[in-house]
Image (cartoon, grey):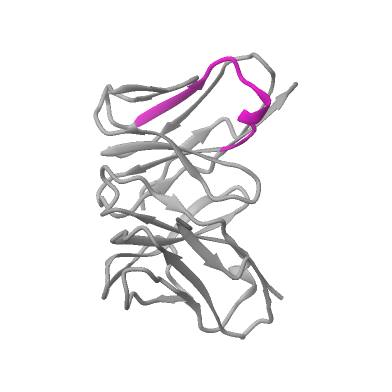
Amino acid sequence: NAGVTQTPKFQVLKTGQSMTLQCAQDMNHEYMSWYRQDPGMGLRLIHYSVGAGITDQGEVPNGYNVSRSTTEDFPLRLLSAAPSQTSVYFCASSWTGLTGGELFFGEGSRLTVL
Amino acid sequence: GQQLNQSPQSMFIQEGEDVSMNCTSSSIFNTWLWYKQEPGEGPVLLIALYKAGELTSNGRLTAQFGITRKDSFLNISASIPSDVGIYFCAGTGGSNYKLTFGKGTLLTVNP
């Protein structure tokens, strides 16, 4: 199994451009989430979803949109990129919720906004 | 939001030495987890703790869920070069769907 797959792995944007980071999992996990990782800041939760059609905000949701139309996919959209969104983004999934569920991470997507 | 204070920020040790790192919080957590991240990869779960006072081992790794539910530690015994990486503590508090991460401990092991 592929596990959690993120694309693209690297992306450079100009300020104001929009883009979508793709995330797909083939483990039939109900729970999916997006984190960003910045030096010295650890991982911070952006948005999460507990099932198809259900999404909610995490710790740092501003500037990002998500949707969950299928169990497998959870794309993260940047509508108007800003330099402050330069980061490494990780998608993660789990069976259901987090209590008792191991979080599986993708390999990350490195985004640079100029 | 909830915050986790993880220490130390970095460690430089010799192969064979034991390592200890910890995480504290001002609020109660319901679960504590420890992850390891290697360069260019996503974090991987090492140990999960679900009950106050719980002590769990995974090979050379041992972690404990503090009795106050506000702290946890991770010990690595007899370190080896492949232990190099960033170790994160994480936990769930008020919401079982929001995992809060510490800022990480960068471990370097000199052969």
Residue B35: % across, % down: 47, 39
Q: Residue B109 location, x and y as percent? A: 69, 25
Q: Is residue A35 above or below residue B107?
A: below
Could you tell me which residue is drawn at 27 percent across and 33 percent down? B50
Q: Is residue B97 above or below residue B18?
A: below
Residue A86 covered by magenta stretch: no
**x 39%, y 71%: residue:** A73
Q: Is residue B95 above or below residue B106?
A: below
**Viewer-proximal residue among B93 and A70:** A70
Residue stretch rendered in magenta on the structure? B71-86
Q: Position of residue B72 (x, y in %)?
A: 39, 28
Q: Quadrant of residue A14?
A: bottom right
Q: For the point 35% across and 23% down, which residue is it?
A: B56
Q: Residue furthest front?
A: A1
Q: Is residue B84 magenta?
A: yes
Residue A19 percent across, percent down from the top left = 56, 81
Number of marks? 0
Q: Quadrant of residue A60?
A: bottom left
Q: Nearer the viewer, residue A43 or B55?
A: B55
Residue located at (40% from left, 60% from top): A59
User: Quick check: A60 left or right of A113?
Assistant: left
Locate the C terminus of chain B by quadrant.
top right
Q: Left or right: where does residue B83 sit relative to residue A32?
A: right
